[in-house]
């Protein structure tokens, strides 16, 4: 029997998403099907044999890596499977917390469909057409970001608009790139192509000055939905961007590319960190923290010649876990308290200590506190940035301090022992599964921080798909 | 310039100006439908009619989806527009047209030498006017109309650069997806309709 990997990791989850969509109001069935599909595909991606042959007794399934589609190819290469495993695991993790009240019922099918579309992004040929799949994923995300009965779609319209603007730029850059390869480095067209391409990616990733939709959407959307989207779309776009660096020598050797990426990375960290520090709404604070994360990714890409891409890839599982914990705890706390304003959450740790600890630790992990998951990666990125440009190294460090400052303010509010002269007593109001999930995530955050090479190294195998970037 | 492409270009200028200035969905839907005919004529300069007609059909389907939803929802224009705001948008549109007229020959010469000037002008006109439309409104359906115009402008230029069935198919999906998002927002924002709960209840 012959099958192809795109059928398994693209068409099958899309079909499952359609099936789950049909029964979207049956929550338990939806969660089970989404988790089974997502975790199943994630585990299969980890253990998938390199010779593309699965033998069960006398039954043999031979896999091919490509499938024809409208005269072009969609390929899911074995070398991309570590990354594909990560995004499906993330889809499964977020499906678990879709059981939280007030989560849009469309979240489960759409999150699975978006993951399948973004998997196709990794292997469509010519790879520039992936821009259209990303746009389709963006369109699919709208109903879960703005479900019926919610108001305020201004941020979502801005998100849609800016992401749509990126599409023509990337396709145009693709056409320009085909003519640039043979030109000398000092040709005007080389610079123009780089600018068009850079603009496209800046729009996609919400890089300054196109970042305004991120806090707007973050504030008007359920945190578990928003964190999923803020993990999966930028992460996939960043990996997709490696195609350009890998295929076009002129881009790799562009003299100012690393400087420009580092500058914008630093800018994102400074803007994100500064605004996070002074936020009162926890959802907005998270949104601005996302900006710093994008900034760190840009710093990592800027150091692609010094092994920055390894750090970028190792950062993805850490980011997934941090975002997931944040999304879960914020949504749960919102359901309990009805507000995510810092003032209205004063002394909340006395009633919900586990959820409060989850929020604080996920924030500290994202900020890069020693012993937690992000620390080993962020410390290397700080070091290498400082070596490349001391001033930008200092600025990125200062910007990142904003996350710590916000966490300290949050901690002070959460543990306030007296509100309106009434002493607060400690008690545990969380449900058992919430305690279990938060506890497991905190343990994993610590394990990631203590043994980064052991746990995170497998995802760096994704780089084998990019021969020029290893 | 041949008569037909020139006529298409004039239609594009007029219809994009109409979408920019007016806020009535009936007028705008009619203008968008006309705009897609003009786009089809221009795409047909680069592509065979069989492929170019896909753009027309998809565009009309997108417009029809939004227009029919507006009819179904009895969408009424709530804003009492002053003549000053109409005048402002009109002047802004004229400035945009002027800028595009000035810029197009240079862009065509330096970046798209293989394309006819009328194709570059029409594409840029749609792109520029769509940007202007997006800057002057916050209504979801108008935002979607503007994004459809924006993509239409890009497709006119890109059709002259590359021909691909997969690309045409994917762009059709994106256009129809945008129209569906527009429909979604129109239905969602209509206070007259009662919707089934789409969020899961609290426990």
Image: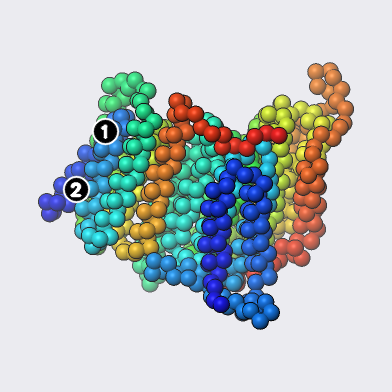
Q: Nearer the viewer, residue B186 or B68?
A: B68
Residue A363: x %, y % from top left: 72, 43
Q: Quadrant of residue B18?
A: top left
Q: Nearer the viewer, residue B54 or A375?
A: B54
Give the secondary structure at mark 1.
helix
Does the CB distance between marks 1 and 2 fall below 8 Å?
no
Identify the mark nearer the N-term, 1 or 2.
2
Give the secondary structure at mark 2.
helix
Residue B27: x %, y % from top left: 26, 33
Residue B104 visible somewhere in the drawing: no
| Residue hosting label 2 | B8
| Residue hosting label 1 | B27
Crowd class of label 2 (few under 14; some 14 to 19; many from 20; radius 10 Å): many
Q: Is residue A86 above or below residue A246?
A: above
Q: Is residue B183 above or below residue B108?
A: above
Tell me which residue sits at (43%, 56%) in the image: A132
């Amino acid at each position: 029997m012959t099958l192809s990997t795109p059928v398994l990791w693209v068409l099958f989850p899309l079909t499952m998403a359609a099936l789950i969509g049909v029964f979207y109001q049956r929550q338990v069935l939806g969660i089970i099907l989404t988790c089974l599909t997502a975790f199943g595909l994630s585990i299969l991606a980890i253990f998938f044999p390199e010779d593309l042959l699965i033998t069960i007794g006398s039954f043999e399934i031979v896999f091919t890596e490509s499938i024809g589609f409208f005269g072009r190819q969609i390929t899911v290469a074995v070398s991309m499977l570590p990354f594909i495993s990560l995004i499906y695991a993330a889809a499964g993790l977020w499906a678990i917390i879709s059981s939280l009240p007030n989560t849009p019922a469309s979240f489960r099918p759409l999150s699975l469909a978006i993951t399948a579309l973004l998997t196709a992004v990794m292997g469509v040929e010519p790879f520039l057409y992936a821009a259209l799949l990303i746009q389709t994923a963006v369109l699919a995300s709208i109903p879960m970001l703005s479900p019926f009965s919610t108001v305020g779609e201004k941020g979502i319209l801005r998100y849609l608009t800016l992401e749509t603007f990126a599409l023509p730029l990337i396709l145009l850059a693709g056409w320009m790139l085909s003519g640039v390869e043979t030109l000398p480095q000092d040709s005007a067209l080389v610079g123009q192509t780089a600018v068009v391409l850079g603009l496209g990616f800046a729009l996609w990733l919400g890089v300054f000055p196109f970042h305004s939709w991120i806090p707007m959407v973050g504030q008007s959307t359920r945190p578990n939905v928003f964190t999923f989207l803020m993990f999966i779309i930028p992460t996939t776009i960043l990996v997709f961007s490696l195609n350009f660096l890998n295929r076009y020598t002129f881009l790799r050797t562009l003299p100012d590319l690393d400087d420009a990426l580092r500058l914008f990375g630093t800018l994102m960290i400074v803007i994100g960190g500064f605004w996070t520090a002074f936020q009162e709404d926890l959802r907005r604070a998270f949104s601005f923290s996302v900006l710093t994360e994008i900034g760190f990714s840009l710093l990592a890409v800027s150091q692609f010649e010094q092994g920055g891409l390894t750090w970028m890839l190792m950062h993805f599982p850490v980011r997934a876990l941090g975002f997931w914990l944040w999304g879960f705890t914020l949504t749960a706390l919102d359901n309990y308290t009805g507000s995510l304003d810092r003032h209205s959450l004063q002394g909340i740790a006395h009633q919900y200590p586990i959820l409060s600890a989850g929020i604080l630790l996920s924030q500290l992990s994202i900020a890069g506190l020693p012993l937690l998951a992000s620390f080993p990666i962020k410390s290397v990125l700080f070091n290498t940035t400082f070596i490349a440009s001391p001033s930008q190294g200092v600025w990125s460090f200062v910007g990142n301090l904003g996350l710590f400052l916000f966490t300290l303010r949050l901690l002070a509010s959460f543990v306030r022992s007296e509100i309106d002269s009434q002493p607060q007593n400690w008690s545990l109001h969380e449900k058992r599964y919430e305690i279990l999930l938060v506890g497991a995530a905190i343990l994993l955050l610590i394990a990631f921080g203590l043994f980064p090479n052991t746990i995170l190294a497998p995802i760096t195998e994704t780089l084998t798909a990019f021969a020029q970037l290893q | 310039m041949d008569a037909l492409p020139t006529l298409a270009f004039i239609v594009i200028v007029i219809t994009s100006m109409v979408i920019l200035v007016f806020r009535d969905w009936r007028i705008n839907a009619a203008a968008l439908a006309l705009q897609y005919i003009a786009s089809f004529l221009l795409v047909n300069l680069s592509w065979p009619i069989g492929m170019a007609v896909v753009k027309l059909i998809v565009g009309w389907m997108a417009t029809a989806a939004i227009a029919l939803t507006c009819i179904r929802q009895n969408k009424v224009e709530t804003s009492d527009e002053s003549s000053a705001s109409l005048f402002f948008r009109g002047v802004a549109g004229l400035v945009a047209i002027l800028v595009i007229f000035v810029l197009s020959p240079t862009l065509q010469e330096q970046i798209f030498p293989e394309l006819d000037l009328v194709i570059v002008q029409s594409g840029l006109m749609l792109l520029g006017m769509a940007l202007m439309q997006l800057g002057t409104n916050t209504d979801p359906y108008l935002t979607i109309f503007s994004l459809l115009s924006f993509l239409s402008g890009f497709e006119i230029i890109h059709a002259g650069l590359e021909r691909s069935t997969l690309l045409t198919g994917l762009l059709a999906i994106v256009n129809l997806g945008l129209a569906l998002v527009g429909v979604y927002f129109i239905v969602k924002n209509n206070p007259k309709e009662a919707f089934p709960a789409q969020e899961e209840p609290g426990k």
